[in-house]
Structures are given as structure tokens and as C-alpha cells.
């Protein structure tokens, strides 16, 4: 699809100022939105799911519906939302203007969430965006005084931008107001371990998000009965099969930053989730931050390919990109880093702000609630 950035904007994009995602000269820590971490908003299977999710607990209702053409958005598709939340929070912390209308390159997104960047991966990304757009959510979470239910899709609209020769220049999408407000409220955002993107199983990924949300860094952790976890997941697998998968995950100890233990209380099988120790230097300075995986695997985190930086070294990309790729981060040259920061401020200035080159303390303090 060929389009001009400036003359053919439609729908919400026409009235929203774009938030242009650019590199920051450093890693952007992945952040997740609390409401999405503890409730069943996504399919946990890679096969197409058409069965709706109906969930109600404590007066909170969640209804998720996919459509036959694409199926329901999956927990792997949710990586796009984690990436978007991470970029928004990082820019807000830097004092930059953001909006629900994101403009970016597929390369930035794919490398940030630990994916490959070939032609096949680009096609899969378009499938992800199609599922996010076609999945409809109705929920009473965070309703206002006079509004009892929100209905939205994870992406309101999206578009790819190409040159006349067919080379992809970038992508745009619009996030729902419900999600965007939940990201701007720092009490509703948590930093997650970059190793999350390497988790393979749907239930495994979902369980990490539950662990991060509920156990956090509490020494005693959190304990769930397995039937409650099953209901909370929205999974279509039988309770017995779900319990078996939980036991296998506990046996592998594969959740970064957490240790799992199966317990019993009478006839009820329980799962205890406890945080493990990790170096303080890798932990957010903010409330509820989280560092990395088990301290035994700190070296693995240092070599993770799932960092959320917009700028990484890259070669040619199956004709989707020019041979130069994206520029590498120059960690030894603060001048170059500041040039990137200045460009970012030009793309996303605060209203009334004067654009000037930034010092090495450009990013400023991090927000709370992470």
C-alpha cells in the first residue's frame, strides 16, 4: 500500500499529532500495563481462536471477541502493546510530547521485541496488527462515574508507508484512549524483564505477567490455587491439562526473576510464586521495578537481543530496507547520542517548549509506579 505521510491521513490520525518513535541512545526498558497483566485479554494459543472470552470477578467484566478472518489477538501480539507502552513512558520521562498516534519503522518494533527482521517476520507483523485491530474488547475496568463500559480494539487503525519503488518507509497505528490513559498513569505501569520476550509458551508468558503483577518483589511472593489461575487465564484447555502445564513450568523454573513451587492445601493444588534475588544495579529506582532473571543468569540478560532501543546495528533486510540499515548505537560518543536525543525532541516537542541540544542528563528522572 503506497501512501503519503502528510496528505492522505484518515480517521483519528487527521486530528492527532504523531508521536514519532526514534532511538534514545540507550535501551528503553520494557513496560507492561497492569490491567492487561492480570486479566484474560488475549488468546494463549497460536492457533486461531474464535471462541470469545467472558470473564467476571469482583465486579470487573472483560469480554473479548475475535473475528473469523483473523481470529483473536494473541499474547504474542500483545508484545506490540508492551513496546508501545515502553516507548510512550520513556518519552514522557524525557519530557517529550506523546500521543496515541505512533509513527515508527517495523525494524524498530521487531528488534525491540526480540523478533527477526526478514520478509517473513514483516508479513507476520502485519498479521499481528490485523488481529489487534479486529479484536473487540468490552470491559468495565477503569470506568468513569457516569460510564459503565468501554468498547474498543487494541489498534484503531494502522497503515504502512512505502516509496514509489515499493520500499517500506515506516508504519503508523493509533492506540485506543483506554490503553493510552492506562499507560500515562504511572501507577498502572510495571517494568518487566526483557527476557519475557524469549518465553515461548502462551501460558508461560501469561504466568510471568501474573507473577510480575501480583508477586512483584514481595519476599513472601503470592499464592494461587490452580483452578483460580485457570479461570483467570481465559484458556480453552481443560483444567487438568492446564494444571499439568503449570507443573511443567514450575519444574523448568523458566519465569525470569521468579521461583515457582507447587503446594497443596488439602485437596487443592496451589502455585506459590516468589521473587528471586538479582543485582540492585539492574533494578528500577522506582517503586515496583524489577531487575532481571535469576542472579545465576545475569550474563544472559547482558546479551539479550530483546532490548527496546530504537537503534541497533543491522544489515540488509530482504529488500525491505536499504543496505545501510539503521545506525548502531555509539555508547562511547555522548555527542552522537545527544544528536539523536535532539532529533527526538524535534519530532516530539512539548507544547511551548524550545528545542535545544540536550546534555548527558537528558532523560531526567524516571516516573514512579514501575
Image (cartoon, rainbow, N blue to C red):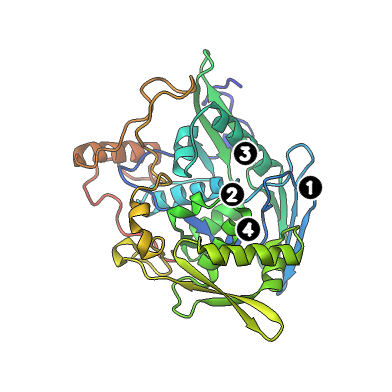
Compared to residue 64, the image places residue 8 above or below, namely: above
Residue at point 33% right, 61% down? Answer: 282
**Residue 354 coordinates in the image, percent (x, y):** 30, 42
Taking depth in this image into account, of 143 and 39 the one nearest to the observer is 39
Q: Is residue 14 left or right of residue 325?
A: right
In space, the residues marked 1 and 3 are separated at their CA atoms by 17 Å
Say whether marks 1 and 3 touch (CB < 8 Å): no
In space, the residues marked 3 and 2 are separated at their CA atoms by 10 Å
Q: Earlier in the sequence, mark 1 or mark 2?
A: 1
Say whether marks 2 and 4 touch (CB < 8 Å): no
Which residue is the site of mark 4?
203
SS for callout 3: helix
Q: Is residue 182 left or right of residue 295?
A: right
> Within 10 angstroms of label 2, few (less than 14), some, or many (20 or more) residues?
many
Taking depth in this image into account, of 264 and 7 the one nearest to the observer is 264
Say whether marks 4 and 1 touch (CB < 8 Å): no
Which residue is the site of mark 1?
50
Amino acid at each position: 500500500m503506497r501512501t503519503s505521510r502528510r496528505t492522505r491521513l484518515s480517521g483519528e490520525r487527521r486530528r492527532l499529532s504523531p508521536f514519532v518513535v526514534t532511538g534514545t541512545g540507550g535501551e528503553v526498558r520494557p513496560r507492561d500495563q497492569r490491567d492487561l497483566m492480570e486479566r484474560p485479554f488475549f488468546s494463549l494459543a497460536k492457533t486461531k481462536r474464535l471462541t470469545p472470552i467472558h470473564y467476571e470477578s469482583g465486579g470487573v467484566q472483560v469480554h473479548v471477541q475475535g473475528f473469523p478472518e483473523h481470529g483473536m489477538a494473541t499474547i504474542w501480539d500483545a508484545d506490540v502493546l508492551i513496546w508501545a507502552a515502553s516507548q510512550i513512558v520513556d518519552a514522557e520521562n524525557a519530557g517529550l510530547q506523546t500521543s496515541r498516534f505512533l509513527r515508527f519503522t517495523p525494524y524498530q518494533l521487531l528488534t525491540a521485541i526480540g523478533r527477526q527482521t526478514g520478509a517473513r517476520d514483516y508479513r507476520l507483523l502485519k498479521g499481528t496488527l490485523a488481529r489487534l485491530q479486529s479484536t473487540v474488547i468490552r470491559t468495565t475496568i477503569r470506568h468513569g462515574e457516569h460510564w459503565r463500559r468501554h468498547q474498543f480494539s487494541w489498534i484503531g487503525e494502522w497503515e504502512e508507508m512505502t516509496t514509489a519503488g515499493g520500499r517500506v518507509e515506516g508504519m503508523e497505528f493509533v492506540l485506543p484512549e483506554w490503553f493510552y490513559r492506562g499507560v500515562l498513569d504511572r501507577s498502572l505501569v510495571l517494568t518487566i524483564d526483557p527476557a519475557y520476550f524469549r518465553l515461548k509458551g502462551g501460558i508461560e508468558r501469561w504466568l510471568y505477567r501474573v507473577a510480575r503483577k501480583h508477586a512483584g518483589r514481595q519476599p513472601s511472593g503470592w499464592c494461587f490455587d490452580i483452578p483460580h489461575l485457570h479461570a483467570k487465564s481465559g484458556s480453552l484447555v481443560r483444567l487438568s491439562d492446564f494444571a499439568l502445564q503449570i507443573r511443567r513450568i514450575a519444574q523448568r523454573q523458566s519465569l525470569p526473576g521468579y521461583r515457582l513451587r507447587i503446594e497443596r492445601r488439602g485437596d487443592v493444588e496451589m502455585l506459590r510464586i516468589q521473587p528471586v534475588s538479582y543485582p540492585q544495579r539492574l533494578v528500577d529506582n522506582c517503586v515496583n521495578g524489577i531487575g532481571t532473571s535469576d542472579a545465576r543468569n545475569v550474563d544472559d540478560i547482558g546479551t539479550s537481543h530483546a532490548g527496546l532501543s530504537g537503534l541497533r546495528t543491522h544489515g540488509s533486510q530482504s529488500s525491505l530496507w536499504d543496505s545501510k540499515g539503521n545506525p548502531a548505537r555509539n555508547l562511547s560518543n555522548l555527542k552522537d547520542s545527544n544528536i539523536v536525543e535532539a532529533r527526538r525532541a524535534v519530532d516530539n516537542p512539548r507544547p511551548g517548549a524550545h528545542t535545544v541540544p540536550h546534555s548527558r542528563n537528558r532523560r531526567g528522572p524516571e516516573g514512579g509506579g514501575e
